[in-house]
Amino acid sequence: MAEPRTSVEPALRLRDLTVTFGGAHPVRAVDGVDLDVHPGRVLAIVGESGSGKSATALASIGLLPGSAEVTGSATVAGVDLVTAAESQRVPLRGSSIAMVFQDALAALNPYRTIGRQISDAYRLHHRVDKTAARKRAVEVLDRVGIRDPERRVDDYPHEFSGGMRQRAMIATAIVNNPTVLIADEPTTALDVTVQQQVLDLLTGLTDDLGMALVLITHDLGVVAETADDIAVMYAGRIVETGTVLDVFDHTAHPYTRALLQATPNLDAPSRRLAAIPGVPASGANRPTGCAFHPRCPFAEQVGEACQTVDPHLTPRPGSALHRAACHFTAEQELPHV
Ligand SMILES: Nc1ncnc2c1ncn2[C@@H]1O[C@H](COP(=O)(O)OP(=O)(O)OP(=O)(O)O)[C@@H](O)[C@H]1O
Ligand code: SF4
Ligand SMILES: [Mg+2]
């Protein structure tokens, strides 16, 4: 695991990032997210379905549909992708910040060879001829562990297995050596052994290329093995963040505690979140006060504040980087279980 690098300029900096989907009933999908992602480090974003993980990622790379109103900032290479004109964003997308999408396996074009798709991504940012771009495609396919890349570069997506297609998507995302890679649930559709290989690939790339990796996942076992830092999202907000060691060993938010308890064995091969009691809140049905209060086992003990006062992220004693938004743990530690 990389050492915390607080003094280094983050590769991606989110400040007060807010995403609202319009319509008759506007949904605040992301609500004031602040995050720094540093070169060579892996930040995991976790949370239940609908908590705003993908919307945060898509806003960071400037790829949300026009129906979404985005405010705040997402700064990469000195450019705020929220306010930048599309003409400024395009050169950065792929070269400075790239993304492996949640439905990556469906994102490959079935009618174009794998090599053509990687070459096209390369030629968006490099003035090279087709031969040089194909050579680069072979190189990155080799880097992501595709055997016999010289031959496989001319295959169509249906000739690749699911794991190989995911590697091809990662190859497309890294072909321009981005400084930030966002991988949205990159292993969910894969079987367990292939999952591990893809995670090893992603962390290897982070180390070798000095990329900052944002890994969106439901799987806390993956977080434990792979990530340096973690941000736990609930109803569009970060409710706890810090290094994985701090957050797992000194959990300071009852929701994080519930997620950890819903993952009975962090070392077991299949670790999708078990359900935690109660109905998840989202931007569409955000309870007053602390959004977690209808499900929180500590809310009664705290009293009215949980239902009426919005808790803010505050630093935990001993670590400025470890922050949690909870009235209970602002005063005391969570009891041991
Ligand atoms: N294009 C859209 N239009 C309207 N609402 C949307 C759109 N995309 C997402 N939402 C809403 O925004 C909220 C956050 O969605 P998001 O996709 O970011 O969740 P997520 O944490 O990635 O969930 P999952 O784990 O299921 O992928 C949800 O309430 C979702 O219904
Ligand atoms: S603020 Fe209250 S309801 Fe929210 S997590 Fe803390 S104790 Fe629970
Ligand atoms: Mg998602």
Image: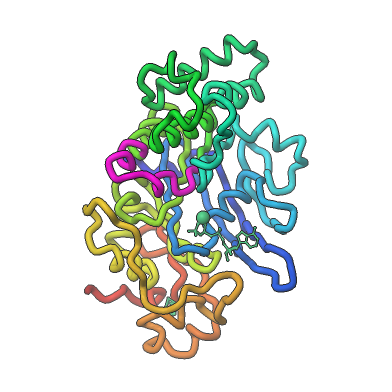
Which quadrant, please, contains the C terminus?
Answer: bottom left
Q: Position of residue 300 (x, y in %)?
A: 39, 89
Looking at the rendering, which quadrant does residue 124 occupy?
A: top right
Q: Residue 83, can we see it?
A: yes
Which quadrant, please, contains the N terminus?
Answer: top left
Q: Is residue 95 above or below residue 277?
A: above
Q: Is residue 212 left or right of residue 60?
A: left
Ligand 2 shows up in which quadrant of the image?
Answer: bottom left
Q: Position of residue 105 (x, y in %)?
A: 49, 41
**160, 296: nearer the viewer:** 160
**163, 180: nearer the viewer:** 163
Q: Position of residue 123 (x, y in %)?
A: 64, 21
Q: Is residue 219 above or below residue 110?
A: below
Which residue shows up at 54% across the image and 39% down it? 11
Looking at the rendering, which quadrant does residue 67 occupy?
A: bottom right
Q: Is residue 166 left or right of residue 121?
A: left
Which residue shows up at 25% across the image and 56% down it? 266
Q: Which residues are magenta?
A: 182-198
Which residue shows up at 74% across the image and 35% down it? 88
User: Coloring scheme of the render?
Assistant: rainbow
Q: Position of residue 247 (x, y in %)?
A: 34, 59
Looking at the rendering, which quadrant does residue 236 occupy?
A: bottom right
Which residue shows up at 44% across the image and 62% down it? 47
Q: Is residue 257 above or below residue 230?
A: below
Q: Residue 246, can we see it?
A: no
**184, 296: nearer the viewer:** 184
Residue 74: say if magenta: no
Residue 197: say if magenta: yes
